[in-house]
């Protein structure tokens, strides 16, 4: 039986499942996400490929499942309320390799969704407040910007799911304007059983990091 997202997401978002059963996806239950690496998607998924970034991921010595991102992201377009995000998961099986589109999920009005998530994360809220000014908030639409990150805590939580299949996953995340892909990046993660009694890592504790946001010229539309 395949785990489903929370009831709210089932009502508000579009999703389909097509899991490949293999020896690396033989179980499911409470889980943790272990990030392996991040890279750009192939050109056929990146569309206009408007977002470009540099990156360096480092692992926290005290909390091995916590990562920090240092790099620059250039976002040369205004993030309008009409933009959507599409997440495509591919599952790995040692017998058959990658199974494309094991899970697909579309998030309409991505800007508002991102703003709401950031508002509930104390670490992100404090970092953005420092970058935008104490009285400013991330608003939609968000103008074209250059983002410079130093030791920014990476949130690998998946709170939409209480249980999930254990295994290896390739995650493609596209930013869409209608049928046009503006950008895409790819994550490789492992889902592993959650250790009983282990408390979740709260990003707002013992974090360091900065964000610098600079407005740039919009190249789209």
Image (spheres, rainbow, N blue to C red):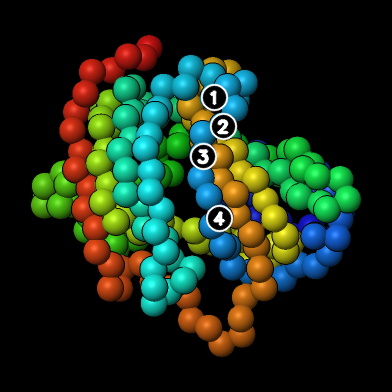
Residue that mark 4 sits on: 36
Depth check: 95 or 218 in front? 95
How many neighbours does mark 1 have within 10 angstroms: few (below 14), some (14-19), or many (20 or more)?
Answer: many
Residue at the (80%, 60%) spot, across then down: 24
The quadrant holding residue 87 is: top right
Residue that mark 1 sits on: 46
Circle 2/circle 3 CB separation < 8 Å: yes
How many neighbours does mark 4 have within 10 angstroms: few (below 14), some (14-19), or many (20 or more)?
Answer: some
Mark toward the viewer: 1 or 4:
4
Residue at the (74%, 48%) spot, across then down: 91
Name the element at disc 3: strand
Q: Quadrant of the C terminus?
A: top left
Residue that mark 2 sits on: 41
Residue that mark 3 sits on: 39
Residue at the (41%, 53%) spot, across then down: 57
First in residue order: circle 1 vs circle 4 = 4
């Amino acid at each position: 039986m395949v785990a489903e997202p929370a009831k709210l997401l089932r009502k508000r978002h579009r999703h389909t499942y097509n899991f490949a059963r293999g020896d690396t996806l033989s179980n499911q239950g409470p889980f943790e996400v272990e990030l392996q690496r991040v890279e750009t998607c192939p050109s056929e998924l990146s569309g206009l490929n408007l977002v470009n970034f540099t990156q360096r991921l480092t692992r926290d010595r005290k909390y091995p499942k916590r990562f920090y991102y240092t790099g620059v992201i250039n976002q040369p377009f205004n993030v309008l309320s009409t933009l959507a995000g599409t997440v495509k998961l591919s599952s790995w099986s040692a017998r058959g390799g990658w199974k494309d589109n094991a899970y697909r999920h579309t998030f309409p009005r991505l800007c508002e969704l991102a703003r709401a998530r950031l508002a509930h994360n104390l670490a992100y809220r404090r970092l953005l407040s420092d970058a935008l000014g104490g009285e400013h908030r991330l608003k939609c639409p968000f103008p074209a910007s250059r983002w410079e990150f130093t030791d920014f805590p990476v949130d690998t939580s998946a709170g939409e799911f209480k249980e999930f299949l254990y295994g290896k996953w390739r995650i493609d995340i596209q930013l869409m304007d209608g049928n046009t892909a503006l950008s895409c990046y790819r994550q490789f993660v492992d889902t592993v059983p959650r250790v009983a009694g282990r408390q979740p890592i709260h990003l707002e504790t013992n974090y360091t990091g900065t964000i610098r946001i600079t407005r740039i010229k919009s190249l789209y539309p």
